[in-house]
Image (cartoon, grey):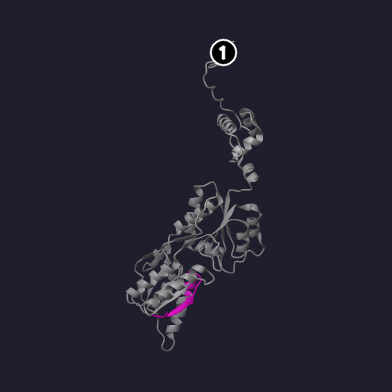
Amino acid sequence: MAARAGSGSGEAPAPDPIRSGRATIEEVAAAAGVSRSTVSRVVNGATAVSPEALTAVQDAIARLGYVPNRAARSLALRQTHAIALVVPEDTRRFFGDPYFGAVVAGISDRIARSDYILNLLIASDDPGGRMTGFVRNGGVDGAIILSHHTSDAFVDRIVEAVPVVFGGRRSGGGGEDWFVDVDNVAGARQAVGHLRDTGRRRIATVTGPLSMAGAVDRLAGFRDALAEAGLTPFAEITGDYSEAGGVRAAQELLARAAGPGGELPDAVFAASDLMARGVLRTLRSAGVRVPEDVAIVGFDDSAVALSTDPPLTTVRQPMHAQGEALAGVLIDRLTGSAPPRRTILGTELVVRGSA
């Protein structure tokens, strides 16, 4: 019988031929001369394995082309490799506001470079507890919570169950929260500072929902910038970040101006581009010139800012970068790194025709 090629010659044995079917963990253990549990420890990254056994298992995995069963491995480690994006908002607002699309794109892009998948959970409330139950019962490894309000009590139950990173500082949240935010105070100060510098003195604002920390911070920046100039707010009208909220605010300003001794502001700072668009369109429909009579500044620098006539002057917040940072901080937490608890991104004033 002819000798096998390489037999007795001191050469390394030829690698196994390509197999049909998938190698099993038992076959790897037999090839490496170790127990099945040793192979499992190596695959799962455990350190309680001798250097010799580690080398033997790694060699056997390479020869046999073994691919671990990810589902079984995840079950053993109590991991799903899934992340929840929880948005406590009405679906109409979520799909109607370009802010969410830009942030979710950033989150998705970062997660695509990891081993995780994204689950999107949208609910303005969770009365039946289904969403909270999904998270708490092991549906995901961690959660990003975006656009949260002080009334969203179910958020606390999610925080108790899994690692969480908030998109924006949480109103009433403890100092232990992880969050990624923009400098809302500085952004509002930039907006009002520009209006002051262009000679405006009767400056009104349309705020976001004051149940949200970001809206409170933008209002604080508005007030600070006016106080520095020795001015008082012409009007502070509470909005909801929607275009309809901007329309209602503009109608209120027009009604005030129509009363005895009434006048319009000469500038409006709206805490979102959608509200700024509602203000601009409503004022122009009433014959008010923008920016000659009333200058308008928004906040976001979304696609909405270019859809108005004239285009919006606005405060640009890096929405895509915020999404990437949110996912990055959570992934770092899940993989044992130590990301900063607070990540604050800068803003930039973009000057266009409305101011």
- Asked whether 29 or 254 is in front, the reply is 29
93 vs 31, left or right, is left
The residue carrying mark 1 is 3
Q: Is residue 320 above or below residue 38?
A: below
Q: Secondary structure at mark 1?
A: loop
Image point (59%, 38%), residue name: 43
Residue 286, visible in the rendered structure: no
Image point (45%, 83%), residue name: 256
Q: State the image coordinates of residue 107 (x, y, percent, origin top left).
A: 50, 54
- Asked whether 223 or 286 is in front, the reply is 223
Label tally? 1
Image point (54%, 53%), residue name: 333
Residue 161, visible in the rendered structure: yes
206 vs 289, left or right, is right
Write down the quadrant of residue 129 in the picture: bottom right
Could you tell me the amino acid type at mark 1? Ala
Instruction: Specify the farthest residue to the bottom.
Output: 260
Say if the magenta span includes residue 241.
Answer: yes
- Asked whether 91 or 177 is in front, the reply is 177
Instruction: Give the residues drawn in magenta, as a range.
Output: 231-247
